[in-house]
Amino acid sequence: MPTTPPAFTGLSAFPLTPANEAGRVDTDALQRLIARIVEARADSIGLLGSTGTYMYLSREERRRAVAAAVECVGGRIPLIVGVGTLRTDEAQALARDAASAGAQALLLAPVSYTPLTQDEVFQHFKAVASATELPLAIYNNPSTTHFSFSDELIGRLSQLPNISAIKMPLARGSDFSGEIARLRAATPASFAIGYSGDWECPHALLAGADCWYSVVGGLLPKPALALTRAAMAGDAAETARLDALFHPLWALFKAHGSLRVIYAAAEIMGLSTAKPPLPIQPLGLETTRDIEAAIAGLEA
């Protein structure tokens, strides 16, 4: 029986991809962020996810980011690379780029301008998954792609070679137990079910999810990893205690969007001076002060 790829279990930390206004990646700043994740011993790194602003970067800049990450990681923990883009052939090319550079896994969202059907997404994923031998995670992110995977489609995709995991949005009504049970019934035992949406992911882990795909883990990997370990051990009391330390940050994530908050936090911590890619605007001084207070109680 196939085993679950380790890239899709535990804490998967998603760093920013610092870049200038022209979209040129600051590889030195990127490596500073990645080195912290490696030092903290997170379970994997998620490069070029939504926090990594993959859709704002050219193929060449994505290549530069992957090369810098591979160099920094040095094979010490798995590196997942996002390969989402509009065209299927371009996504296949990005997958091959990542594999050639030394990535251990892929992440794919069904990015599109024209709304896609369930079968169109199936064919897209089938083609991209077949472009390399790397395990691939489905990126179910309807808030940005405006596409929702049906349970039937997830089940079909889970039967394809190399499609090994799914990164889910937060469960409706926070019913993680029910959703996980439903997905487990439709997918192979080795198929990993993880979640994004940091403020509720500890509850998903307590309910039996395999992975937390974490925005905050990309910047504050040590406290995020402690929270992950407590939740995966089923220690509800310790999970609640650690999660409470993050509550001010979670409130800012929900109010302003985690991407804007993390850019400001990275600058506060002296790790990057990059701004969000335009037209996304940086946060104002008052909110920045709230962010500084929110991260003050967390281990940097």
Image (tube, helix red, strand yellow):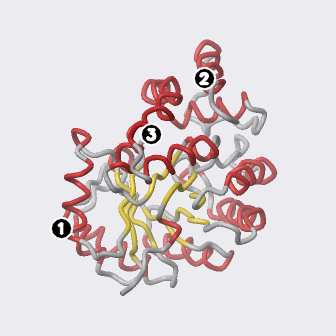
Residue bearing the label numbered 2: 291
Above or below, 43 relative to 20:
below
Relative to residue 65, is residue 260 drawn left or right? left
Tell me which label, 1 or 2, sits earlier in the chain.
1
- For label 2, the crowd category at 10 Å Cα-Cα, with few meaning under 14, some 14 to 19 and many 20 or more, is many
- What is the CA distance from the residue labelled 3 to the residue labelled 2? 22 Å
Identify which residue, 227 or 55, lies in the foreground. 227
- What is the CA distance from the residue labelled 3 to the residue labelled 1? 33 Å
Determine the secondary structure under disc 3.
helix
Above or below, 120 relative to 1:
above
Figure quadrant of residue 259: top right
Residue bearing the label numbered 1: 152
Which tag is nearer the camera, tag 1 or tag 2?
2
Residue bearing the label numbered 3: 239
- For label 3, the crowd category at 10 Å Cα-Cα, with few meaning under 14, some 14 to 19 and many 20 or more, is many
Tell me which label, 3 or 2, sits earlier in the chain.
3
Amino acid type, mark 3: Thr
Determine the secondary structure under disc 1.
helix
Q: In the rendered view of the protein, which quadrant contains the N terminus? A: bottom left
Amino acid type, mark 2: Ile
Residue 269 image point, x, y percent: 74, 32
Which tag is nearer the camera, tag 3 or tag 2?
3
* Residue at figure coordinates x 57%, y 48% from the top left: 225
Tell me which label, 3 or 1, sits earlier in the chain.
1
Residue 54 image point, x, y percent: 56, 54
